[in-house]
Amino acid sequence: MLLRIKKAKGNKDRLTLLSQSALLDLHCYHKNWKPKEYLFEGQKDGKYSVQGVVNVVKKAAFKAKIRIPVTPHVLRHIFATHLLEAGVDLRQIQVLLGHQLTKTTEIHTHVATYIFKTIKNPLD
C-alpha cells in the first residue's frame, strides 16, 4: 500500500502511504477519467503545474472549512508529525519524505508536547 511519486519536488522520486479508502477512490477515479500518462492530469492531459497542485489543496481546505493557510508543504509537516506521534520511527518517516538527512526530517516533525507524557523515565 505504497505509492511512488515520480519526479516530485527536486526531481526526486518519493514514496507515500496509500489508505484502503483512497485506493477505492483512486480506482473509481481511474475508471471514470481514464488518465493517459499521469494519474492526475491537467486540462490538456499534461501533468499538473506546481500552482495547480497548490490551488487544489487550497480549494479542498476551503471546502473542509479549514481556516488556516494550507499548502502541500504544510500537509507534509502534518503528515510527518502525525506519523511521529503514532510511534513511527524517525528513520521510516525520513524515507517516506524522501530526505537524505535525518536533520531535515526533524525540521518537518513538530512534536506535540503531549507525546512527552508517554515517555517512561528510565530513572523511575
Image: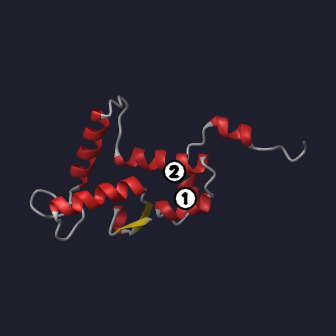
For the point 32% across and 68% down, the residue is 7
- Outermost right residue: 123
For the point 10% across and 56% down, the residue is 43
- Residue 99 image point, x, y percent: 50, 63
Q: Amino acid at mark 2?
A: Ala
Rounded to the nearest whole Å, what is the CA distance between mark 1 and mark 2?
6 Å
Q: Is residue 99 visible?
A: no
Which part of the image, by quadrant, shows the C terminus? top right
Horizontally, is 24 left or right of 2 in the view? left
Q: Give the residue number, with chain letter if any, for mark 1.
A: 93
Q: Amino acid at mark 1?
A: Ile
- Could you classify mark 2 by the number of other residues whose Cα lies within 10 Å: few (under 14), some (14-19), or many (20 or more)? many
Q: Is residue 64 visible?
A: yes
The reply to whether discs 1 and 2 touch (Cβ–Cβ < 8 Å) is yes
In the image, residue 50 sits, relative to residue 57, either above or below, namely below
For the point 17% across and 59% down, the residue is 32
Horizontally, is 75 left or right of 86 in the view? left
Q: Name the foreground residue: 122 vs 22.
A: 22
Quarter location, residue 31 = bottom left
- Residue 109 image point, x, y percent: 55, 48
- Residue 6 image point, x, y percent: 33, 69
Q: Give the residue number, with chain letter if any, for mark 2.
A: 80
Q: Name the foreground residue: 63 vs 22.
A: 22
- Could you classify mark 1 by the number of other residues whose Cα lies within 10 Å: few (under 14), some (14-19), or many (20 or more)? many
For the point 32% across and 34% down, the residue is 64
- Residue 110 image point, x, y percent: 56, 43
Which part of the image, by quadrant, shows the N terminus? bottom left
Disc 2 is placed on an element classified as helix
Whichever of labels 1 and 2 marks the residue nearer the N terminus, that label is 2
Number of marks: 2
Disc 1 is placed on an element classified as helix
The scheme the figure's colours follow is secondary structure
